[in-house]
Amino acid sequence: MEERPFSDISYEQYLKEEKLMGSRCRKCGALFVPPRSICIKCFGSEMEWVEMKGEGQLHAFTCITVAPPFMMAQGYDRKHPYCSGVVELEGGVKVDARIDGVDATKPEDIKIGMPVKVKFLHWGEGENRETYLAFEPA
Amino acid sequence: MQKKRKLGRGVAVVGAGMSKFGMFRDKDSKDLFAEAFGEMLTSVDKGFDPNDIEALYLGNFSNDFFMHQSHWGPIISDLIGLAPKPATRTEGACASSALALREGVFAIASGFYDIVLVGGVEEMSKRSTEEVAEGLALATVPYEGRVGFTFPGVFGALATAYFAKYGASREHLMNVTIKSHSNAPLNPKAQFPYSIEDMMTMKIEGAKKKGKPVPHWDDEKAFLRDPSANPVVAWPMHLYDCCPISDGAACMLLVGEELARNFTDNPLYVVGIGQGSGKGLHAAADLTTMEATKNAADEAYGMSGLKPEDIQFSEVHDCFSIAELIHIEDLGFFKPGQGYKAVEEGLTRRDGPMPINTSGGLKCKGHPVGATGIGQLFEVWKQLRGEAGERQVPKKDLRIGAAHNLGGTGGTCTFTIFERR
């Protein structure tokens, strides 16, 4: 796999390419998503990229009605809430993500432990195109 | 294992002041700090010359964002006549002024200074709710803000994890809210000095005055369950789970321990100061506990030689109702998973065995973020000196009180223990 720096910038670039990538320490095998350049288990700095399958379980979530401006620009507000959550992936690592394909007006129906699969939400065009990591019910 | 920690020199608190907290159209950060400073001056029992203050440590999270003005150390230093003496700003999100206190303590403990002013200030209410949410979200972990997490959203997610692990529910969060609101009417500086029953009466009276349909609720929980009275912000966080947007300031005068009796016969001693850092939601092994709080508690207990059961009352950072439950467990006051039961049983009431947030907490007292850490310790100061008036903890021989302050989504936590000897 090509050598990109193990950074948040690379993580975001990969998301734009619809890949959920983490880094693994070549010395001790610890896995990090998003990637870390320094292993916080053994302080090794030799990393390799790992592509995650993108399957996991919903670990925690919230349905947000009072949205920050950048989410309001995407059409979310008090009447149109959205769901954000923490998803546990293979290998026990967790990521923060948008949770799509659920009804954020009915949070009682969203269940912790629910199986989810990765999805990439794109917003905007051209240079302004942003990609957000998301998951939806599997 | 706790490591034994100690200061090179003991530090005492000999004065404290706090502005009223609230949303003030006609007061700015300088006015609020002047109010806190004025009260601090009158609180020093034997009086002192403000010219003797050698340095200022000032907590401020983000007046840069809220007021488009940065660099508050010298602004406040000039306000109170300290310039050209050194002024240092500390930033740890909502724990900014607890960090100021810690730096002040270290400066005296090192022997470099004898008399130091520590304080905090924040001015938030001149922005819309959405803008404040955006400003506070600057202190989330980058991956959280990126996928839409707001502050209430992060704590909402913690609540879902806590519910799933321990079988608690929204009803248990309501107990925290009702308890905090029961203390608030007794605090004249609180932003919302009202019980939930007071709020219900005000809504009913308001509806009558406007000729609108008069609402009815059977009890406080019925009110809190009603989405028109208590709308959702970031499920399961509703309006009454969230602290308000506030302006305010607070400060304290610290001196070397051996000098304390020159200022007052009733000083408090800083016997424990702990701090910790957290990694954010995605990297936390367990979302029902905060590593940063546990590290802060370990440091403070290790320094003081005290145990959780020695703490007679505590202010605990209840930016959101769920935070109070998680922290009373992390600080060792209750076992993991027992916090919500303790609140339900009334153990954390003002007249209970472990009073929590006698000030009304951030929920009712207000949360001007950079002022909150020292604002919490102002309550500890009042309680330990027996000056808390109607909200005085009814325990005999009140000697040891503490305050837990949290910044960001758990990125910075502190735990500070004061003792009256």
Image (cartoon, grey):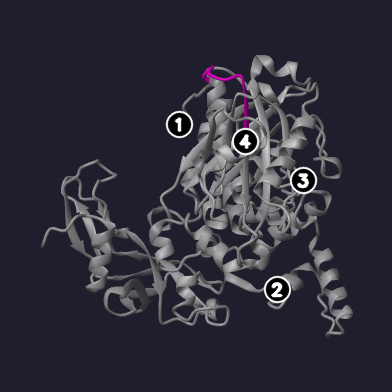
Q: Residue at x 63, y 67 (%)?
A: B170
**Spatial separation of the CA atoms under disc 1 and disc 4:** 45 Å
Quarter of the image with the N terminus of chain B in it? top left
Contact, mark 1 vs mark 3 (Cβ under 8 Å): no
Place residue B156 in its image quadrant. Answer: bottom right
Magenta region: which residues?
Answer: B110-119
Q: Nearer the viewer, residue A32 or A3?
A: A3
Which badge, 2 or 3, comes first in the chain's sequence? 2
| Residue B1: assigned label | 1
Which badge, 4 or 2, comes first in the chain's sequence? 4
Q: Residue at x 21, y 54 (%)?
A: A24
Identity of the amino acid at label 3?
A: Gly
**Residue B338 visible in the displayed image:** no
User: What is the x, y in percent for residue B187?
Assistant: 80, 48
Identity of the amino acid at label 2?
A: Arg
Disc 4 and disc 3 on one polypeptide chain = yes
Q: Pinpoint the chain carrying mark 4.
A: B
Which badge, 4 or 3, comes first in the chain's sequence? 4
Position of B408 compared to A27: left or right?
right
In this figure, which residue is indicated by the disc labeled 2?
B225
Disc 1 and disc 3 on one polypeptide chain = yes
**Spatial separation of the CA atoms under disc 1 and disc 2:** 43 Å
- Disc 1 element: loop
In this figure, which residue is indicated by the disc labeled 3?
B352
Q: Pinpoint the chain carrying mark 3.
A: B
Identity of the amino acid at label 1?
A: Met
